[in-house]
Amino acid sequence: MLELSGNLEAIMERSSGPMIIPWDRSAKDGANNVADETEPTYSEQTRWMLAVRDARDKEAFARLFDFYAPRLKAMAMRTGMRPDQAEDIVQEVLLTAWRKASQFDPARAQVSSWIYQIARNRQVDVVRKENRPVPEELAAPEDEEDDAGQVMALEQEATRLKSALASLSEDQRVIVEKAYFGELSHTEIREQTGLPLGTIKSRIRLGLERLRHELKELR
Amino acid sequence: MAEIHHHLTEPQIAAYASGALPYPFAMVVAAHVSMCAECRARLGAHEVLGGAVMEVLPAETVSDDLKDSILAQLDDTPPDEPAPRRNGIYPGPVAEALHGEAPKWRALGRGTKQAILHQGPNGSVRLLYIPAGQAVPDHGHNGLELTLVLQGSFADADGTFGVGDVEVADDAVEHTPVAGEGMPCICLAATDAPLKFSGFVPRMLQPIFRI
């Protein structure tokens, strides 16, 4: 059985502005059962990740595993990995997330994008046997309170982007999926220019624009 | 931080986010993002989209023992390697490729020097040192060249490039960049094909200089 730590107080202390309701241990089905809809709250993933970051909460980490492990495995298999190799990646990515949790800043990155980025770095290293160059990290927000308004804004944009994704036709969805989960073999840059922005719905482009502005305002 | 006028293109940032860029270009992108808040935000946006696509991906069932195996390792995971840090004019990813040491410059003549960081079938990435006010030899390209200024500046037909600026040049561009006055220009340059220098270094010597 996992050790349960008293993480609620830690989270409550950190929160300011909108009331941040800690993740609910009784909600086993993954439903977001928050009583008051007018009260802005973080997504479950964010609350789990904050509990990991601030209280080293293993049960919250187990929830992150339940949510992300099957998706990370699917992502790794899209790049041509065998199921066992894909599970190695899952393990390394989630352990990295545990170790690097102190660097998680929900105002700058939503949990899924943070995990995606860790997974991509690891996959490039493994598939291409190279040490992927990564940008310098910005200083971790030590002892600072999370900017709840900014966190909410980022989550809202991510949610909009997800519904825009859901509204794509099958063809368009495949294009976007290939752009972000493509093969990682060496490709000529001009053959592989990433997301063909011209071919997908303007809603996604707008979403990227808005996100860019959200993230830019942080500086 | 100097104001940056020449940024990466959207497809380059998307390609970096998705892991598709070959190592030499990934190095330039990571270095520029380390210096440019604008492109860091744009990269962040693409990573949000990548994360969103991952979230809606049909899940793959994982082995029964995977979860317990990972949870059992939480207490004794080794400390994480520190993220690359800036060293002088060299942004984190470049400092990392230099292993914390000074570049091993090789003379190219007339005070111009280079230090190759990586060379392979996927292209090459190097540091270039050009004395103040001096022209870089006229060269066209077989492929794409990304050049990021780390110190000083240079100017060519496409404009003036200062610290943090990236120039994107392809086959069509036959350019003669000239380093700005005041201090030597140091750039990080990535190509996916050998440079074609015309004049400055005779073509037969190019294999020796590895340019």
Image (cartoon, coloured by chain):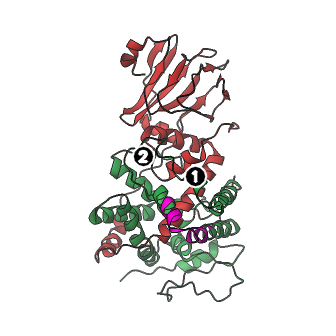
Chain colours: A green, B red
Instruction: Answer with left or right where residue A47 lies relative to residue B211.
Output: right
Image position of A76 (left or right of B82): left
Q: Which quadrant is the C terminus of chain B positioned in?
A: top left
**Above or below, comparing residue B178 to residue A207 in the picture:** above
Q: Nearer the viewer, residue A55 or B112?
A: B112
Q: Output the chain of dot 2.
A: A
Residue A140 seen in the current view: no
Read off the magenta span.
A161-175
Q: Residue B43 got which mark?
A: 1
Magenta span contains residue B97: no
Looking at the picture, which amino acid does disc 1 mark? Leu
Residue A111 image offset from top left, x and y in percent: 53, 66
Query: What residue sits right under mark 2 in the picture?
Result: A132
Q: Are marks 2 and 1 on the same chain?
A: no
Q: Which of the numbered marks, if any, corresponds to residue A56?
A: none
Q: Residue at x 46, y 44 (%)?
A: A191
Query: Residue at 63% of width from left, 40% of height from top?
Result: B7
Q: Main secondary structure of the magenta part?
A: helix
